[in-house]
Structures are given as structure tokens and as C-alpha cells.
Amino acid sequence: MWEAIRQFGDTYLMWKEGPLIWASDVLILLTIAGIVAVLTYFKKWKWLWDEWLTTVDHKKIGIMYLICALLMFFRGGVDALLMRTQLALPNNHFLDAEHYDQIFTTHGTIMILFMAMPFIFALFNIAVPLQIGARDVAFPYLNAISFWLFFFGALLFNISFVFGGSPDAGWTSYPPLTELGFDKGPGENYYLVSLLISGIGTIGTGINFIATILKMRAPGMTMMKMPLFSWAVLASSIVILTVFPALNVALALLLIDRLFGAHFFTIQAGGNPMMFINLFWVWGHPEVYIVVLVAFGVYSEVVATFSRKEIFGYKSMVASLMAITIVGDLTWVHHFFTMGAGPDVNSFFAVSTMAVGIPTGVKMFNWLFTMYRGRIRLTLPMLWTLAFIVCFAFAGATGVMLAAAPADYQYHNSYFLVAHFHQALIGGVVFGMLAGMYYWWPKMFGFKLDERLGRWAFWLFNLGFYVCFVPQYALGFMGMQRRMYTYPAVFGWGPLNFISTVGAYIMGLGFLFIVAQVLYSIKYGERDVTGDIWDGRTLEWSLPSPVPHYNFAVIPYVTHRDMWWELKEQGRTQELRPRPEDIRPIHMPNNSGRPFLLGVCFFVAGLGFVFAWWLLAVLGLLGVGACLLARSFETHDEHDVPAEEIRRYEAQLGRL
Amino acid sequence: MGQREMRRRVTRVGVIAVAAALLLSGCSPQYMVLNPVGPVGKKELDLILLSTVLIMMVILPVLALLFYIVWRYRDKPGNKAPYQPRWSENKVLEVIWWGIPIVVVAILGTATVKTTYALVKPPETNVKPLTVEVVSLDWKWLFLYPDQGVATVNYCEIPTGVPVQFELTSDAPMNSFWVPQLGGQEYTMPGMAMRLWLQADKPGTYYGHGANFTGEGFAHDEFRVVAVDETKFNDWVTHVKQTAPALTKAGYAQLKRPSIMGTASYKSFPPGLFNDTVWADGGQYMPGMLNDVPGGAPKHGMQDTSSMSSRMAQEAHMSS
Amino acid sequence: MQAHNVRTLAGRDKHRHALRQYVIGFLASIVLTLAALWVGFAHGLPAGPLLLVLLLLAVLQIGVQLFLFMHITEGDGPPVHSLAIALAFLFTFVFVAGSLWAMSFHYMVA
Amino acid sequence: MSTLTWEWPGVHAAPGETSGEVSIEYSQPSESLKIFGFWLFLATDMLLFACLFATYVLLHTHTAGGPTARTLFDVPGFVAETFILLTSSFTSGIATYEMRRQRAGSVALWLVITMLLGMAFVGLEAKEFVDYVQMGATMSRSAFLSAFFTLVGTHGSHVSLGICWMAAVLIQVLRQGIHPQTARKVFNVSIYWHFLDVVWVFIFTVVYLTGVVM
Ligand code: HEA
Ligand code: HEA
Ligand SMILES: [Cu+2]
């Protein structure tokens, strides 16, 4: 008995691995115990289930995405600091190769799939229905499913560190290194299965938001009157729809290789590992546009609002979004110029890659000229936006340099590349997500985040960013490869790496200021009583903060692009207030525990696949099937909110 | 904090960043990519410089404009700058900024395409090239000299002024062959024989490293390229032939096991080792390979399944 | 449920027209398949043109399914779903052709 | 009526706009929204198959000394599968047609026929797979076979899933008759079915036919 436990502990809980794992084990147990204790003590279990776990309300789902994204940012950030600590000095042995490999893999995977993706979905959910004058998304139930698939996918990925071992072949996970012949551990299976699960959810989100944006706009809101953030979400969702299947196929095929002995990507029996690389980047490149397009949407809203001016060149903005959507899908080969596919292939993809710079440049200029002849308020969202323009100009510049295929032969897999993509991902995406978070925070929670602490966070993070990543460009020119857990002193890479590490810690400090800011503001933050704390332009600012669960008591009729601002200009804001006689009962979707259960079933099945415990896998899949069938037979999933109740509530908010 | 102060800080950070980038990427020989010693690296450097200049010509004005606009139109009581909240369209301006990037991309694109085609040809045509076959292993580099008959591990002697045709493959997970001072990298892939032209114009010892992640030993996957003049190169070959041991099939199998090692030299190697390796890892399916072999039949091995299972066994062994 | 507010369809012959569509579609799909089989087995076309003809027949089949069976042109509001399907066809082509092109490695050492 | 204003491919007939009448599955906004969502799903599913096709085409000659397409594929078998599936596509179309005429019984009948044909198809395919495996042509024999089993198997499991779903819809039609919600379900399941037919046509062409004749 004891022996069996010990063996289980050694194989799955990795007790032999030492203090890092033990500490994580203890930390996780303490966290779980703490959460359970708090929930029980405050008698919050029922509240948690009724209000959150079963919710189909897009605003709450958005908030849950946001919380997950911030937590994952922290996890990914801790990974980053661990890596940077190891790299601070030549010949350092703070981490060994095995752990370093696991950490950069989880860092990259988590940051992109479990930080950036939920962050954009948080903003999708929070802003889109409000901006377009809808009561919820097109498919609220599917929305909940998407969230829980993401959640359990992320959970599965995160437990790998303490249960069986993390993946360690990079976020790109190229075979044959990841084939069974070279990598026996369950870590790689964790990577494949958890990304598959959350990938299915992501496709759901893509479908949902395309349908929402195309079909649920308030009457009068033609496509050309739609706010640019919603356009950006549409663009991003189209990219999701076109490329996520490629990721899922790539992952599934590799999983089939590993679990069922097939030969897609092995080097025996005719497998071709390059095809994985190809499929991965068919998704992987557009993926960066999936996230950055949403950030572009945020910037468009923020720039117009805080310059007190209409967005410049709205039509160009729409055209450039769509151009990036389409052309961005045609550039994936630039990630493997050095594979030697030949000059024809490289030339084509080099030029198509550079071509993406054209519409992006147009956006840059339009943002600039939105500010021109405006009145610029340097609030937090605007500060992050300005910092973005600076940072992303350089990210794009280095991107275009990478796109010159023969030059890329020199940059590829070097720290020059690492610097490029952090500049794009942080300067483009993270800055945008933070800008969006600050911008819509009052709408979500009814109070503003503290400006003073926010400025500290802003300056520290920005300063840290350049200190961390500018030296990495130089390191690239000095020939330093990415994914090296240590390096010798002779090449002179030490000093710049040290500087870079210092920068990373400054960024960490900046992040801590954000945490402090949130905690401080919960107590002392400025309350938003008008619902329009920024002097906004679009429909969401016509609503009270936080927004009632049915969003609009009466769906507005839209006549202008910046509807709310227009009405304010003309002194007609009263028109967006509901009139008692217009209030009708509202159909709202019912809460359901099934999406959560479905997530649990996927999780169970996923664990079964990771360890090839087939019984568990089959049980989980049966559960999935049962949930789907039950859904099919559900006929009434809506309820009416009586008009009286809405009137009472609106009166309470002082809107009647 | 006052807005003016903040603005100053923005400027300062920006200036420092740019200055640091420019200063750091100086001429110190540590910057291998910026100090190429052969025509391939030089061509690539030319393209790097061209792209940098072109893109900076757009980016820097954009940033200057940004700082100017933010300063001029800040929301400050008494700011006299015009405020036109509805000014949101201007055909001429928009044509200009659709136009600028198009022109830049056209120029850079042309240069890129030209260089791309140039690099698949030998850098010099009137000198007879040297062929070196490269096999990346876990975690070491094996160099085979088919014409000289010698082989080395983790270092590669080449004559200066002679174009070298590296033929690349891998008998381990995919790697990438990179000698920054000679020129850009190319993947070494199992089952494929890729070609990379490089040439050293100055004698010297140049750093090389696997550039694509291959697992635990990746950080130590280093090698050297030693360029010497032609007579010294010939002397070196003779020297190796006289003093070094032979690489046998068994020796190769030993070499293939995952390990980290120093340099080694061999006076000979099993004939066709490179081709055998490529074929054994799936080379028979690669389109380019079929041209070589009439009827598409493989030259060596890998037809019967028994050798396949032996490979699987080997791989299983390697990972353990 | 407003099930019964829905007006039933007008006119018998319009129904017959719809039915005729299905029948035509079915016959077309059978004929196209037979044609493909015939071209494949009975006709000694060289590989290139053969492939071309077969793919052409397959594309016609898609047309049959999409237009005669799947009512791709119908819907309420603008035909955005047709646009989605068109986009999917475009990217199907791009991803398949692009992948095969990138994986063809014409410049390897022979 | 929408079906009827259709004249020529590419000409869009928005039923609501042309005649003031909407066919039943589009008659409620929430239902027509779901149809739209389903079209979007079909679009992504198509791209999923695109990737599988690309993989198959790339690997179809990589037989590792094992069976090739020409030696393996059984012509009468896949021809039969093709005709069965084409017929089932037609019968599921008739189910839609009857749904629009609000004839629940008839819809049920045609759905049952479609399901039976579907089962016959899946049965034949399963038999085909079992035969191959018995000949030693398993998924782990060669890259070609991995790609073959995965591509055709993914289609087969789509069909199987479609059968289950159709059964669920059938029960609802029988219990509740035709109303906008059940009508939408009949419509979606049948465009799903046609879509699988489209995919099969390509499998038939790219995998089987070219496999044996080229
Ligand atoms: C949000 C993320 C993001 C974004 C937006 C981008 C944007 C771009 N990226 Fe980047 N990239 C990554 C994230 C991102 N990238 C990641 C994560 C990797 C590596 C992954 C890995 O290997 O692990 C990578 C890798 C990568 C490579 C592969 C390098 C290699 O592996 O060797 C290349 C090569 O072409 C490239 C190019 C580009 C280009 C041309 C753009 C363009 O879209 C940029 C366009 C923007 C501008 C050009 C600036 C604004 C324009 C103007 C001011 C007008 C003037 C413009 C012109 C004159 C053109 N990127
Ligand atoms: C959105 C994506 C994203 C983001 C935001 C980041 C953020 C950061 N990244 Fe990362 N990174 C990637 C995506 C991202 N990265 C990807 C895709 C890879 C490639 C992976 C691969 O090769 O497979 C990569 C790889 C990568 C490397 C290269 C590793 C290698 O090749 O060997 C490095 C090295 O410096 C690095 C550093 C950093 C740093 C310092 C940050 C900083 O911004 C982080 C800021 C820090 C925090 C937010 C931490 C906050 C926490 C605290 C303050 C708590 C402190 C407490 C303790 C230490 C206990 N990243
Ligand atoms: Cu890219």
C-alpha cells in the first residue's frame, strides 16, 4: 500500500524532482484549501454557482475571462522572471536544462493561448454587445461553453507542472523532437490535449461573435456606423474561424502519432515532420493578428475618446482591418524561410509579409491624425495607447526587417527574433489589453482604477520593457540563439543579458503596481455615477455602470456613427433614456450548469488522453455526448423579465 | 505628475532606446552578424542595412509627428491650437499614407527577391567549390568531406576564397546550421538534403551553433568553422589522413547517441554515409531526391521493414 | 411558440418547382459521379488532364449540393453566410495549395 | 417563398424582402440566427478538412514499402459508398422539402431513410477499414495509411455523429411536430448532411478515384 503510494507519487507527482515541485505542490494545496475555506466561511458556494459558474451573461463571462487572463499573466510572468534570472549571468546554474526548457515552453504557451486569448475574449464579451446595442451575444449558452472549455484547457495545462511533468519542446512544439521516439513524457500530451480543448472553445467564440456582430446590431446601425472596436472583433473572429481548424488538425495529428502509433510527423514510415511546422504556422502567424487586431480596435476607441474627436479615416480603418485579415492569412511561411523551400516560395511569402505593413501603416497614420486638431487627455488608457504607437512602430519595423527572407537567415531563432515578438506582443497586445481594461473597467465594475498607481505601473512597465528587450536585439546580432538555458562567457553576451534581466524585474515591479492599483481602487477608487466617466462616444457609455443584466431596457435606434457623442453634442441624450411606456418584457437566456459540466467532462477526457487511461477518456467523452444530447432536447432556455421589474430597476438607477 | 514632465519622460525613454540600439550595434567584432567575412554574409548585411534605413525613414518621422501632435494638441486650458472635432476625412492625406508604405514595400521587396535568388547560387563561379556534408546529431555536428575522404566532429576546416557547398541533413531532431559571420542559417532536417552556399574570405575561426531547439543538450551544440588558405587546408587534410582514426559504422552509431563532446577528426568514413542517413530517415519520399534516382528507387537500404524497426528501436534507445 | 402563425407556402406549382430542384440535383450528382468513374477508368487521359477533369467534376458536384440542396442563396437579410462559405473555399484553396507548394522543396540537393 | 424565388446560382433571394414570406425555419429571429451560426460552423469545418486533405495529398505516396492506394482500394466498395451517400443527401433534402410543407410524418420518414442510408455507409466504411487492417494495412503501417485513415475516418465520424444528431431531431419532430425550432433543427441537420456529401465527393475524387487510376 505504502509502496503503491510512493510509486504513484514518483511517477505522477514527481516527488523526486525536488524543492521546486514540492513548493508548487504545497502552494497549490494551500491555495485550494484557502479558496474552499473562504467560500465555506462566507457561505458563498451557492452564490458562486448561481451567479458565476452557471452564468450565461456576457458581462460576467467577460469578467471571468479577465480574471483568468490576469492570473495567467502572473504565472507566465513568473516563468519569465525565472528564465531571466537564469540568463542573468553566463554559466549560471540557477535552473538546469530540463526545467529551463519546461519554463520557456509554458511561458510562451501560456502567454499566447492562456493570457492573450482570454484577455481579448474578455474585451469581446465586455464591450461588443454593449457597443452594438444588443442584449447579449448571439449564442449565450455557447459563449459559456467556450469559456469553460478555455478554463478547463488552461487548468489541464497548468497542472502538468506538478502532475506528470510539463511540456518542454517550445510553444511551437516541432516534431520529430516531440514524437514518442524523442519525448516519452506526458508533458507533450498535456500541451496537445489542453490546446485542443481550448481551441474548440475558441472556434465557438469566433462563430458567436461573427453572428453577434453581423446579426444583432441595434436597428439603424449599419456596418458603416459600427464602432471600430466591433469591427476589429469581427476581423479577429474571421481569422479565428479560418485558422484555428489548422491548429486543431496539427495538434490532433501529432496526438494520434503519439497515442496510436501513426506516422504523420515521424521520421519513419514516410512521416513528414515539416508538415506539422507548416500547419502550425498556418495558424500561428494569423494568431498574432487575432490578438493584435483586437488591440487595434481598443486603440481606435481610446484615441477618438481621449482626443475628443471623430476617428480619422473611418473607411480606411475598416478597409485596413479587412486587408490585414485576408493578407495576414497568406504569410505563414515567413516562420520557416530557413527551411529551404526555395527562392520562389520565399520570395512570395516575403513580399506578402511586408505587404501587411501597408494597411498597418495606414492605421498608424489614421490614429495620429485623429489626435491632430483634437484635445488630448493623458488618461491611463491614452497613455498606454501612446506607448503602443512608439513601441509597435519599432516592432513593425523589425518585423519588416525579418520579412526580408535572406536577412531572416541571420535573425532566425536568435534573440533578435525574441526581441521582435515581445515588442509586438507586449507593445501591441499587452499594452492594448491594458488600455482596454482601464477603459472599460468602470463600465464593468462601476469604479475607476486609481490614476496615480496606474502611472507608476505604466512608467515602470515601459521603462522595464525597453531595458529588457532592446539589449536582446543586440544579442541577436551577437549570435545568441533563443532557447539556450545557459551560455559561455567568451562571446561577451553576459552584460547585455544582465541588463535585460534587470529590465524584466522592473516590468515585474510594474505588474505589482497594477495588482496594487486594483486592490487599492476596489476600496478607494473613484465611483462612476454617470455611466459616462470618460465622456465616451459609443452606446455603452449611455448605460449605467455597472450595466443591468438585460443591458438595454429599450433597444436604441441608431442614427449616427458615434451615436452617444452625437446626442450629447445636440443635447438629445434624453432620447437614449428608456421611456416607461416603451418598456416591454425582455427575453433573457436561462442560466445553465451544463456548460460547466461539459468543461469538466472535457477535462476528465483530456486527462485520460494525456496518460492513455482509456477508461477515463471514454467516460469523459460519454459525458460530453450526454451534455450535448441533453442540450438538444432542451426546448425552453429563455425566460421573460417582466416589464414591471425592469421599470422598477431603471427607476432605482434614476433613469426613468 | 505634470503633463509636461511626463512628455519629457516619453521623449527621454524614446531617445535612450534609439541611441542604445544604435550604439550597441556598433562595429565591435562581437557583433558577428554585422561583421561578415564572406560574400554571403555581406549580401545579407546589405539587405539588413537597406531594410533598416528604409523602414527608419518611415518610422522616425511617424514618431516625431506623434510627439509633436501630442504636445501641440494636449488638453490644457488655454491651448490655442485649433480644435476641429469633426475633421475626420481627407482624401489627399489618405492617398499619401496608403502610398508611402506601398513604395517602401516595393523597393524592399525587389531587393529581397533579388537577394533570395542570388543566395541559391554559388557566390563565386570561377573557383571550383568544395563540398562538405553536414549531419547534425544530438548534440554535435559531423562534417564529411566526400572529395577529401576525411571527417570531423564539431569543427570544420575550409579554404578561404573558395565557395563551400554545405549539404545539410540531420540524424536527430531538426536543427539549424548557423555560422553568423559567414552567413545565414538553414535547417538540417532528417530525410532531406538541403544546400547552403557559404564562403570565407578571411582566415579565422568562426563561431557556429545549432540554432533550432533540439532538447536538453541544445545549449552546448556548438562548433567552429576554421578558415585557412588553400595550401594550409590541403596540409590539414593530409595531416588528418595520416594521424586520425577511421570512422566506422559502429563508430557512427556510437556518435549518434545523445551526448555532448569536444572535437574529433577521422581519416575516413563509410562511403555513402550521408546518403544512407538521408534515405534511412525518409529521404526516398522527398521530391528533389526522386530526380536523382532513376525510377525513384532508393540507392541504399530502407526498403525492407526490418531496418525500419531497427530505427525505431534506436530512437527509443536515444530517448532513454 | 408562434409555430402556427407561419404562413404555409403558397401555390402548389411552386412546391413542385422545389421538388423538381431536388430531383434534378440528385440526377445531376449521379450523372457527375458516373462521368468521373468513366473518365477515370475508361478513358486513357494522361495524369495531368485527368486530374483536372476529375477536379472539375468534383467542383460541379459541390455546386449541385450548395445550390440545389443546401439553399445557399437563401436566408434572411444579406447573404453573409454565402460570403462565409465563399471565404472558406478561398482559404481551403490557399491552405492546400500553399502548403503543398511550400512542402515541395524543389531546390533540395538532388 | 424563398425556395421558389431562387433562379440562378449567385442571385441572392432574401425571402423576407422579396415576397414578405419566410420559410418556416427562418421565421423566428432566434432560429434563423442559429442557422447562420451553423453556416459559420460549416465554414470552419471545411477548413479543418482542408488541412486534412493537404496532409493526405502530401503523404499519399509515402507508403514505406507497404500497400499503395492502387493495391489497397476496393473499387466496388467505394463506388457503393459514394452512391449511398449521394442518395442519402437527396433524401435528406426531401426531408427539408417536407419540413417546409410542415408535414411532420413525412419529414420523419425521410429522416429515417436518410439515417438508414447513413448507417449503411458507415457500415460499409467500417467493413472496409476492418478489411484493410486485416490485410496488415493499419494506421501505423505508413504515413500514407495514417493520413488515409485519419481523413476518411474523420469524415466517417462526422457521418456517425450526424446520425446520432438526426435521431435526436427525429424524436423531437415526432413529439412536437414542425414548429420554427424543430424546423430549424431539420434544416441544420440536413445542410450538415449535404456538407458531408460535399466532403465525400472530394474524398471520392482525391483519395479513391485518383488513387486507383493514377
Ligand atoms: C502580436 C504579435 C505580432 C505582430 C503584430 C507581428 C507583426 C509582424 N511580424 Fe512578427 N512575430 C510574432 C508576433 C507578431 N508579429 C511572433 C510571436 C513571432 C515568433 C514566434 C516564434 O518563432 O516563437 C514572430 C515572428 C516573425 C517572423 C519570423 C521570423 C523568424 O522566425 O525568423 C517574421 C518574418 O517575417 C515576422 C514579421 C512580422 C511582420 C512583417 C509583422 C507586421 O504585421 C508588422 C506591421 C507593422 C508595421 C510595419 C509598423 C507600422 C507601419 C508603419 C509605421 C508604416 C510604414 C510601413 C512600411 C513602410 C512597411 N514576425
Ligand atoms: C503575450 C506574450 C508574451 C509576454 C507578455 C511575454 C512576457 C515576457 N517574456 Fe516572453 N515569450 C513569449 C511570449 C510572451 N512573453 C513567447 C511566445 C516566447 C517563446 C517561447 C518559446 O521559445 O517556446 C517567449 C520567450 C521568452 C524568452 C526567451 C526564452 C528563450 O528563448 O530561451 C524570454 C527571455 O528573456 C522572455 C522574457 C519575457 C519577459 C521578461 C516578459 C515580461 O514582460 C514579463 C513581465 C513580468 C511579469 C508580468 C511578472 C509579474 C510577477 C511578479 C512581479 C511576481 C514576482 C514573484 C516571483 C518571482 C516569485 N520570453
Ligand atoms: Cu508571423
Image (spheres, rainbow, N blue to C red):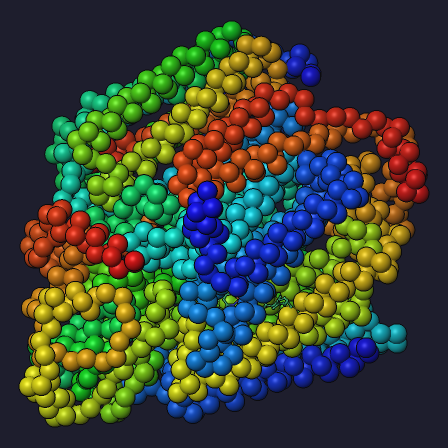
Q: Which of these two is toward me, B301 or A398?
A: B301
Q: Percent position (x, y) of residue D116?
A: 38, 14
Quadrant position of residue A52: top right
Q: Residue at x 46, y 67 (%)?
A: A100
Task: Tell me if residue A15 can be seen.
Answer: yes
Q: Is residue A549 above or below residue A185?
A: above
Q: Percent position (x, y) of residue D22?
A: 61, 21
State left or right for residue A449 relative to residue A262: right
Q: Percent position (x, y) of residue A616?
A: 46, 35
Task: Tell me if residue C106 can be seen.
Answer: no
Quarter of the figure that contains the C terminus of chain B: bottom left
Q: Residue at x 65, y 24 (%)?
A: D28
Q: Is residue A509 above or below residue A647?
A: below
Q: Is residue A53 above or below residue A178?
A: above
Q: Which of these two is toward me, A143 or C51?
A: A143
Number of numbered tags placed on the structure image: 0
Q: Residue at x 42, y 60 (%)?
A: A168
Q: Residue at x 50, y 55 (%)?
A: A161
State left or right for residue A26 relative to residue B173: right
Q: Is residue B297 above or below residue B236?
A: above
Q: Residue furthest front?
A: A2
Q: Percent position (x, y) of residue B105?
A: 45, 69
Quarter of the figure that contains the N terminus of chain B: bottom right
Q: Which of these two is toward me, A606 or A31?
A: A31
